[in-house]
Image (cartoon, helix red, strand yellow):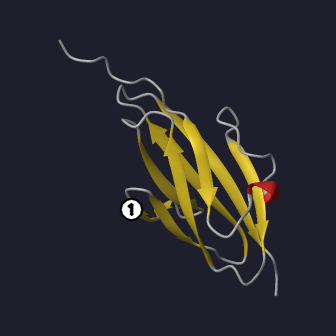
Amino acid sequence: MRDPLSDDPMLSGLMLGGTSPDEWSPRFSPGVYSYNVSVPHSTERTFVEPMPANPGAVFTVATNPTNALASTTPTGAQVELDGGVTTITIMVTAQDGAARVYTVNITRADQ
């Protein structure tokens, strides 16, 4: 008999390189799906590290407005930050196909 497929598309954690959780609005919580964070102009890129609550879940990381997939590794994705706001979309998909989208709006300060 097979183990049942996971139906949990939630994140248990989410890290953005170069930021502190204290800088996020709101602070990360698995049941909150949209975040805002500001970074200094000197921050040209960030590493997005989603942590699925269930190890069988997978994720993709994309940036808007182009919806281009970020350069993804098994642990996360490197995202280039343009001036202004870069929107990062993280789609988490459980083994049974259930999906959840998390969004992070990163505002890079002007020079």
Q: Residue 13: which quarter of the image?
A: top right
Q: Quadrant of the N terminus?
A: top left
Q: Residue at x 48, y 27 (%)?
A: 8
Q: For the residue marked with disc 1, what is the amino acid?
A: Thr
The percent position of residue 32, horizontal first and vertical second, equals: 70, 36
Q: Nearer the viewer, residue 3 or 106?
A: 3
Q: Is residue 111 above or below residue 77?
A: below
Q: Quadrant of the C terminus?
A: bottom right
Q: Residue at x 36, y 25 (%)?
A: 96
The local secondary structure at tag 1 comes to strand
- Work out which residue is located at the far left of the displayed protein and give it: 1
Q: Residue at x 40, y 37 (%)?
A: 55
- Work out which residue is located at the far top of the displayed protein and give it: 1
The percent position of residue 106, horizontal first and vertical second, equals: 71, 63
The percent position of residue 17, horizontal first and vertical second, equals: 62, 67
Say left or right for 107 vs 73: right
Q: Which residue is mark 1?
A: 73
The percent position of residue 3, horizontal first and vertical second, equals: 27, 18
Decide: few, some or many residues near mark 1? Use Cα within 10 Å; few <14, some 14-19, many ≥20: few
Count of labels in the image: 1
- Work out which residue is located at the far bottom of the displayed protein and give it: 111
Q: Residue 108: which quarter of the image?
A: bottom right
